[in-house]
Image: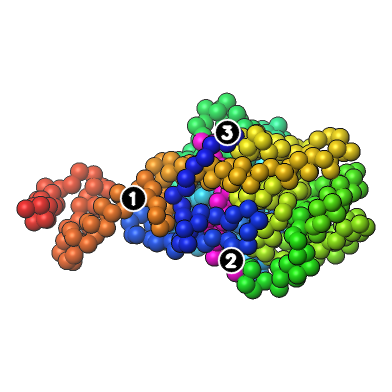
Amino acid sequence: MAETSYTSHFFASDGEAFNRHHTESTSSAADLNRLGGGAARGLLVGALDCRRLGTQLRPHIFSRLFNLESYRCAGLVSKDLSKIGGHNVLNFGEAALEMEAKGANVIHLGCDSTVTGLVSGYHRASEGDEENRLMSLMQVTARNEMENYIKRRSGQTSPLAYVLAPNGCYKGSNLSFFGLRLPEPSVLEEDQEEHLTYCAGEATFVGVSGKNAEDFLTDRGVACEQMPCGLSVLPRLCGKPLSKVKKKSAAYSRLKERFGKGWIAVEISDIPERQEIDFANAVSALAVSKGLGIAVYSSRSIGRDAVGRQLKWEALLGETAEVMWFGDSDIWEIAYMIGNAKFYVGSCLDSRIIAGAFCVPRINTPRADRRNVDYCSVWEAESIQDVLGEDQSAWVSEMNRAMEVSPSTLQRHAEATAEAFFSSISIACRQTTLTTRLFAGEKPDHFGAVLHGQKIASDWMKTPEDRSRFSKLNKSNRSGEAAPSVRDEVKKVVKKFTK
């Protein structure tokens, strides 16, 4: 991505756009002002029933971004994740019953879960008794019977776990995709490929993040818009919950007290076992040479018991360096910890994007599916290395070079990425029924339309009689050509206010 300097229109109330490099002050987004006209009902769809960092943060971002009069979060499994900072998630069947689908906006919060099959997605999201029941059924039940069981339990009828079609319970809904990613399109089965193509073709807006998704859809005649991940604007839209971490989080206070000179944020969820020792040695050597501590966590199992993993990585990393496990915290504490780290390294792409939003130097570990490379090839600055090389003996020097990227480069890139995201959102608002909330110091494309709607509401429809006449006109227009009597009524109102 070209390193172009932009000036963002999305300023915080204190005049700063976002958290500066290595600073403690997280700038809050300005108070979100609904200026009337255009509030919609929204159903936020994705792997929101999984305990993953980026997945749990996206609903907060998009619910603050869009002007929604009401919204619900939906996935395969009903689950209350508010204890880790997430939402109360409904399964697709319950969400359809609670929220009228016709006219509602089904907003797909795209991530790598797009390619998740129905069975594997339900297995990943299930917990407790349902997880045990599912494991037992998988031992004795054929695949098609398993799929039918999951469809009955979840309300999802498609072969892809987190892609809803505008039919059945959701007939008449408005589909849109934001940040759709396809790490490896080749893993899609034929029916999954057809379903994704159909749903994307029916959507009013398809935003993709990465070359794979763009190539997949354009080859099938589906128009799409390249856009960064929504996590790239996390500190701009979620400043208030992030700022509470510094004031109220005991875990973050302990981290600050222990590592006064700073820390390296290390994410370990998808590091292959054959690379664990070399990776731990490289990170430890880097931390010792810089005089920093290591805050280690997993982005994939937030809030779940991970004592075994904790002890393992504390032993691997703690032979020469100071280590603190940070994986028991909630999503806001982990995000704030990443945002105030001196450096980020790990397997998680979402954690990398969060680090980029806070202007933190970063690098990912190599992955077999190359999802990090796919995203970074489009949305990372050319001077910032995407992943560590295959030569594990060179990892320490590669991490050192990644840490030496100048703060000004990191800041320019964060601004450019946020500007690109908001530009894509402006395009989405023109193509869908969605509008954004308004921020202090910012005038989006629909600003004039909002003011016009306010004027109509305040000047033209003050009395019940005027409102009744316009209501008749709207009903007549929906059913066909307005009757002459209704047109005469409207002319009277127009004449009254245009003298």
- Residue ranking furthest to the top: 219
Q: Which mark is residue 447?
A: 1
The residue under the point 34% across, 50% down is: 447
Q: Which mark is residue 243?
A: 2
Mark 2, other Cα within 10 Å: few <14 / some 14–19 / many ≥20: many
Q: Nearer the viewer, mark 1 or mark 2?
A: 2
Q: Does residue 366 appear to the left or right of 216 in the view shown?
A: right
Residue nearer the viewer, 398 or 407: 407
For label 3, the residue is 2
Q: Secondary structure at mark 2?
A: helix
What amino acid type is highlighted by mark number 1? Phe
Counting from the top left corner in percent of width and height, residue 183 is at 69, 38
What amino acid type is highlighted by mark number 2? Ser
The magenta span reads: 225-244
CA distance for labels 1 and 2: 29 Å
Q: Secondary structure at mark 3?
A: loop
Disc on the earlier residue, 1 or 2: 2
CA distance for labels 2 and 3: 31 Å
Q: Nearer the viewer, mark 3 or mark 1?
A: 3
Residue nearer the viewer, 295 or 34: 295
Q: Does residue 53 appear to the left or right of 14 in the view shown?
A: right
In the rendered image, the vertical position of residue 219 relative to residue 104, given as above or below: above
Residue nearer the viewer, 490 or 207: 207
Disc on the earlier residue, 2 or 3: 3
Q: Does residue 277 appear to the left or right of 343 in the view shown?
A: right
Q: Is residue 237 magenta?
A: yes
What amino acid type is highlighted by mark number 3? Ala
- Quarter occupied by the N terminus: top right
Residue nearer the viewer, 364 or 254: 254
Disc on the earlier residue, 3 or 1: 3
